[in-house]
Image (cartoon, grey):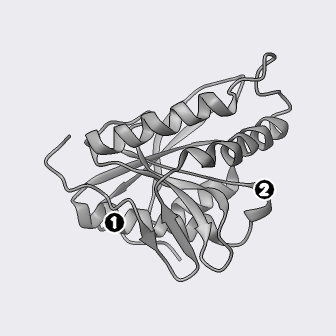
Amino acid sequence: MTSLRAVPTRLETEWLLLRPWRETDATALRGLWAERDSRARRRITPDGHPTVAELEEQIREGLRGTERTGLALLVIERRAQPGFVGYCGLIVGQASEDEPELAYELLRGAHGRGFATEAARAVVAAADAAGWRRLWATIRAWNAPSRRVAEKVGFHASGRVDADPERGDSLWFVRDAGGGEAR
C-alpha cells in the first residue's frame, strides 16, 4: 500500500449508507450483472458465469484487497430502506494504487434519483481526506448518465480514449484532489 491513509469502509450521507461487502451480497450483485448484460443484449455467459459462488469469492478477494491497498469498493444502501442498490468506491481497475479509479454502478430501479452522485461525492471527499492526489474514472462513451455523475463530482475528460468496438470506447476522466465540484 502507498503511504496514504485508507479510505473509510463505511460512509454515511444524508440519504445513503456505504458499507463493506458481505458474502450475502453476492445474490444482489448477480442481479446487477444480469441487468447490465440484458442492457448490452448479451447473457452473463453461455454457462451462467459468474455464479453466486464465484461472486462470493470475488467479494472475499475484494475485502482482502481493501486490507492490502486501503481502497474500498462499498455497497450502497438507502438509509431509510436498507438493501443493496449498487456499489461505489475506489479500485485499482484500469488505473493504479497511487491514482485509483472511482467506480459506481446501480440497479436499474435506483437510477435517476441522485444516488450515484451522492455516493460518488462521499467517496471523493474521503479520498481527498485520505491524501489521494488524483483519481480516475473510465466510462463507456455511450454512458451519458455516468459521465454526468463524474462531472458533478469534479472529474473532467482527460482526452484519453481506449477503443473497444465490441463494448464501446472507454473515456478516461480525471480529478485532482480538491478539484471542486461542478454544479
- Where residue 117 sits, quadrant-wise, is bottom right
Of the pair 167 and 33, the residue shown nearer to us: 33
Residue 55 coordinates in the image, percent (x, y): 60, 34
Instruction: Write the residue at 53% across / 77% down.
Output: 183
Is 182 on the left-hand or right-hand side of 175? right
Q: Are marks 1 and 2 in contact (CB under 8 Å)?
A: no
Residue 178 coordinates in the image, percent (x, y): 29, 68
According to the picture, the residue beneath numbered tag 2 turns out to be 108
Q: Amino acid under label 2?
A: Arg
| Residue that sits furthest to the top in the current view | 47
Circle number at residue 126: 1
Instruction: Write the residue at 65% across / 72% down.
Output: 114
Of the pair 157 and 113, the residue shown nearer to us: 113
Residue 164 coordinates in the image, percent (x, y): 64, 24
| Residue that sits furthest to the bottom in the current view | 14
Q: Is residue 111 visible?
A: no
Instruction: Write the residue at 81% across / 17% down.
Output: 46
Residue 83 coordinates in the image, percent (x, y): 67, 63
Is 26 on the left-hand or right-hand side of 39? left
Q: Secondary structure at mark 1?
A: helix
Spatial CA distance of label 1 from label 2 is 26 Å
Q: Is residue 92 above or below residue 144?
A: above
Q: Amino acid under label 1?
A: Ala
Question: From the image, which quarter does the N terminus lie in?
Answer: top left
Q: Is residue 67 above or below residue 182?
A: above
